[in-house]
Amino acid sequence: MVATFDDADRVRRSLSAGAYLGLTPKRYDSEEVSRNGRISKRGDRLACKCLYEAANASYYRNLDGSRLRDWAGAVAERTGPRKAKVALARKIATTLHAMGRSGTLFKEVAMA
């Protein structure tokens, strides 16, 4: 991820990191129709693959109190596990970009 975001200021906001990597859905908009499509698949393919593998491992490992895994499980109930893992990969990319810009370490707060 450091090689992908070699200059952290290339992407202004951390929320745009998913779009930079192609992990956001395409939008189809016209006057009458507005819907989401499949992910755009633009960006570094190796980084996306690594993020998806990290999301896959996080999704299937039984980590007690993991807020990201609980969030992905809630998304999976609504949309299915594949979309949930892509959404989790996008969230991991956003978190990594924010950590890179601020220079902080990741520390997840366990839910009580």
Image (cartoon, rainbow, N blue to C red):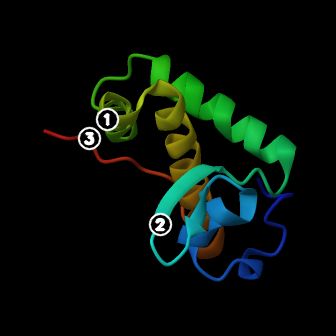
Residue picked out by circle 2: 33
Mark 3 or 2: the one toward you:
2
Which percent across, then down, holds residue 71?
Answer: 33, 40
What secondary structure is found at the residue carrying circle 2? loop
Where, quadrant-wise, is the C terminus in this rendering?
top left
Query: Which of the marked residues, 2 or 1, is nearer the chain's N terminus?
Result: 2
Mark 2 crowd level (few <14, some 14–19, many ≥20, 10 Å Cα)? few
At horizontal 29% and vertical 35% (from top left) the residue drawn is 74
Q: Residue 1 carries which label?
A: none
Label 1, label 3: how far apart the Cα atoms are: 24 Å
Which percent across, then down, holds residue 102?
Answer: 58, 74
Label 1 with label 3: CB-CB less than 8 Å: no
Q: Say which amino acid is labelled 3.
A: Ala
Toward which corner of the image does residue 52 lie, by quadrant?
top right
Residue occupying the far front of the picture: 32
At horizontal 73% and vertical 82% (from top left) the residue drawn is 9
Residue picked out by circle 1: 78
Mark 3 crowd level (few <14, some 14–19, many ≥20, 10 Å Cα)? few
Label 3 with label 2: CB-CB less than 8 Å: no
Position of residue 23 relative to residue 72, above or below, is: below
At horizontal 48% and vertical 17% (from top left) the residue drawn is 60
Residue picked out by circle 3: 110
